[in-house]
Image (spheres, rainbow, N blue to C red):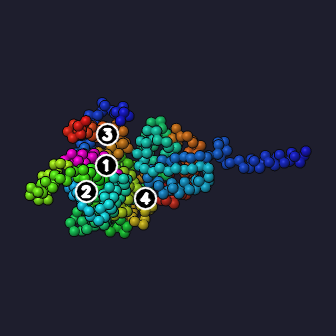
Amino acid sequence: MVGLLQRAPWSELADDLTDPVVRDALRLSLVCSAGATALAFVLGLPLAWVLARTELPGRRAVRALVLLPMVLPPVVGGVALLLAFGRRGLVGQYLDDWFGVRLPFTTWGAILAEAFVAMPFFVIVVEAGLRSLDRRYEEAAATLGARGFTTFRRVVLPLIAPSLVAGAALTWARALGEFGATILFAGNLQGETQTMPLAIFVELQTNLGGAIALSLVLLAVSIVVLVSLRERWFPA
Amino acid sequence: MRRFAVAVVAIAIAALGAWPAHAGGKKPSGAITVFAAASLTESFDAMAKQFHKKYPDVDVKLNYDSSSNLATQINQGAPADVFASADADNLQKTIDAGAVTPPPVVFTKNRLEIAVEKGNPKKIKGLADLQKSGLVVVLCADQVPCGKYAAEAFAKAGVAVSPASKEENAKATLSKVSIGEADASILYVTDVKASKDTTTGVKIPDKVNVIATYPIGVVKESQNATAAKAWVQYVTSKEGQKTMRKFGFLPP
């Protein structure tokens, strides 16, 4: 961090930051990380529920699979995504043939790659939240006549809100920094799939100052989010 | 006594005969790290094997990436002994920064080719065909030599292509074509040749083609300059050049 700050070309920072490359990359980073977090929410919440509350056979295997991307090198994840959702991939060829949907080299591809890598953080935190929840609240709701889904929506969700937010924050942070799976699966094109980490990587090849400026932006965004979350959800 | 003198002379002659051909310096030994452009992957891998046969005491480690990335790393003090770049600019960048000892030695050249899927199912005949809509074209990033050369070729041909992605180096770009994710790309002739099982090359006519120049240099801070120089010498030697030709590179 100190190295980064010490080498920062402060005088040219303003120029570097108004560069369209930087603007596009920042916008894409925010869009993709938010999209990945939303995807993790939609897919991860039911998953966490199944893992925490059901006695489904093979639950352990499912949990191991869900958590795998957490320990898997992202580059391997990128290769796996390409083989699954690429144009010739297991699923990708049908997406292309039937719906004309192609994920690689699109913003959706970048979102998918980030979600793949970051979703385990959401699942693991929310599952823990669900497990530590006192089930008597739900039983009480049920005795008062609330159906399953109503109980979930009105009782469970508000009670696990801190877990949801913490999980989402971790997921978002991981998605924001995602590089390996994104560059492999979604490629690198300004305004389409070039998020901040990709822009930093490419910029570093010819323009160290630009790369440092981009890094500082990412650093600032991370700090702002961390600080605002800390005050709101993780009081000291 | 006389017999003893003869023996001494004989031993001295034998010792002289055993004196290595590159007299004057120490015999190369130890390890060297060669930073090389990604497009040199196959040729330098083969070169390292032959080099090791000639100098069994030298261990060659190869690190491949885009020349621009390697140049940045060397300028930031990466522990390299030799730098082989796919363009003159990036080697010059390291010389200007005082990281590599001048002068750069051009050891080979390369040409561009259109890389398409095996058998050319999209029937691409030339650069102009890459403008077709619906065609997924992947190029090297503008910062990387192969991307720079491709842009030059497009400019010469008066063709404007909108790529689906700009990859980080020649091999990453090639892989997108060889796994079928992209329909076409502009790469070096040698890259296409190296992956002929999965890709086919479509020639680019000389008048719009670009010749890539590959210079090599020894890193100033090298901990093993003797072996580093031996590597550069080997690459430029007759034997080394034969290897480069075998992989489709042009004479310097």
Instruction: Answer whether labels 3 and 4 touch (C-beta < 8 Å).
Output: no
Residue A161's label in the rendered image is none
Q: Residues within 10 Å of mark 4 (few under 14, many from 20)?
A: many
Q: Which residue is mark 2?
A: A52
Instruction: Identify the residue position indicated by label 4 in the image.
Output: B191
Identity of the amino acid at label 2?
Answer: Ala
Disc 3 to disc 4, C-alpha distance: 33 Å
Q: Which residue is mark 3?
A: A215
Residue A178 within the magenta-colored segment of the rendering: yes
Residue A192 on image: x %, y %: 25, 51
Q: In this view of the protein, which residue sits in the foreground, A128 or A137?
A: A137
- Choose mark 2 or mark 4, whichever is in front: 2
**Label 3 vs 2, first from the N-terminus:** 2
Q: Can residue B53 be seen in this snapshot?
A: yes
The percent position of residue A177, horizontal first and vertical second, equals 30, 46
Q: Residue at 33% x, 38% y: name it.
A: A212
Task: State the residue at coordinates (39%, 49%).
Answer: B145
Mark whose residue sits in front, 3 or 4:
3
Q: Which mark, by number, is residue A178?
A: 1
Tag 3, which secondary structure?
helix
